[in-house]
Structure formats: structure tokens, C-alpha cells
Amino acid sequence: AQSVSQHNHHVILSEAASLELGCNYSYGGTVNLFWYVQYPGQHLQLLLKYFSGDPLVKGIKGFEAEFIKSKFSFNLRKPSVQWSDTAEYFCAVYTGGGNKLTFGTGTQLKVEL
Amino acid sequence: ETGVTQTPRHLVMGMTNKKSLKCEQHLGHNAMYWYKQSAKKPLELMFVYSLEERVENNSVPSRFSPECPNSSHLFLHLHTLQPEDSALYLCASSQDPRGSPLHFGNGTRLTVT
């Protein structure tokens, strides 16, 4: 069965620090890749997605992610985080068979002033 | 405003009770989903409906019974639940069930006593 790994469960950064959250998956075929974010007290919402084309995708609020097929990775990055980026971030992978979208366990990011 | 509305927000029920969770989407989407979110675990897909037809039943116990009367409404009927079923139940919708981004509701926090 496919799996999605987010190795960082908790990350604490100071404002203006750079962010990179790891996401690796275990499926070797064609994938759709997503990052979702859940701000405190709010619903899960889409941050960015990759379906095809340029492997570097840009999302909302200055986030970007890079799909590296050879590494089965889709890491999330932001050059300079803000306090308002405090949230839980989920990586998700869709593999096309069986309407299956698999989520990682999430990374809790806390940005300190 | 998410476009996906779930009621109730909180539910406490005994193991012998019968209750239902409701979800309504206002986005014109054709697919709807139930997910279970438990602490420190990946989101677990429970059911997928596409155009009111169930297309995925992810080995969910029969004490959970979904119903999709039309493409805008989704129910999760609950009966004889166990304490380990306590979790956040999320409804989501998407344009289609083939990897389109999900739009989530705020969830129903269920506690089984």
C-alpha cells in the first residue's frame, strides 16, 4: 500500500527564518501531489498542488514546493516565515487507482515572534 | 466560509445511541467524502461518493453508514459506536473523484462515552 511520510512532526521557527517541510511517498507511478494547511480553529484548505509540468509549484502566501520524481519527494518551502504561518501542514498524494488520496500525519509548525 | 458546511460541530453520544452527521456543499462539486481525523494519525478516508454513487468504502465498520441523497448532501449515520471512534469527522467535496483538490468542512468533533 502506498504511504506518505512527513518526517518532521513539530517544527518551531522564529519569524523570518526559512522553512522546509519534508514529504516523501512510496508510489512509483503517476501522482498528483498536494499540500494542505490547517490554521488554528479553521478548516483544512489547499495550499498548493502539482499535477504535471513545471516541478516547482507556487501556492498561496509565498509557499512553494518542488516535485523531485527520483526522490519521491514533494517538499514544502517558504523563504521567510511569518507568525501567521503557525498551522498544521499536511502532504497528500493521489495515485489514480481506487480514488485513493493518502495523507501524511502532518507537521505542526509554530512560528515565534 | 468553506463552501462545505457540517453539522453538528460537536457531538457527544453513548455507545447505544443513534445519531447522524450532516454535510452540505455549495460548490457544485460532483464528489463528496467522509474522512476520520485522529490525533497523531493520517487522515483516514472512509467513504467516497461520486454523483450520489458510492465509489469507495475503505473497510469501514458497519456501525458507520453513509447516505448521499443528492450531489450536495452527505450523511454519516452512526450506531453502537465504540469509544475508539471518538475523533474529528471531516466532510470534503471535489469537482471529481479523480484527484481534484478537496474542499473541507470544519468537521464534527465526536465523543463516544
Image (tube, rainbow, N blue to C red):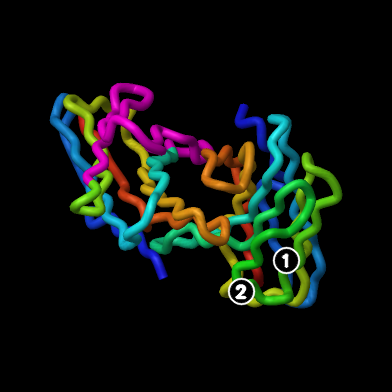
Residue that badge 1 annotates? B13
Question: Can residue B17 be found in the magenta stretch?
Answer: no
* Number of the front mark, 1 or 2: 2
- Amino acid type at circle 1 is Met
Q: Is residue B24 above or below residue A59?
A: below
* B71 with respect to B91 (left or right): right
**Percent position of residue B65, x then y:** 76, 66
Q: The disc numbered 1 marks a residue on which chain?
A: B
Left or right for B38, reference A91: right
The image quadrant that residue A99 belongs to is bottom right
Q: Is residue A10 visible?
A: no
Q: Is residue A64 shown above or below A76? A: above
| Residue sitting nearer the eye, A64 or B104 | A64
Reply above or below: A59 against A87: above
Q: Residue B93, can we see it?
A: yes
Q: Label 1 vs label 2: CA separation?
A: 23 Å
Give the mark nearest the N terminus, 1 or 2.
Answer: 1
Q: Secondary structure at mark 2?
A: loop
Residue at label 2? B59
Secondary structure type for disc 1: strand
x and y, in percent, of residue A79 in the image: 17, 26
* Residue at x-position 68% and y-position 45%: B31
User: Residue drawn at (19%, 53%), measured in percent from left and top?
Assistant: A71
Characterize the local packing of mark 2: few (<14), some (14-19) or many (20 or more) Cα atoms within 10 angstroms.
few
Amino acid type, label 2: Ser
What's the magenta region?
A: A39-68
Give the position of the C terminus of chain A as an image quadrant.
top left
10 Å crowding of disc 1: few (<14), some (14-19), many (20+): some
Residue shown at 59%/66% (left/top)?
B86
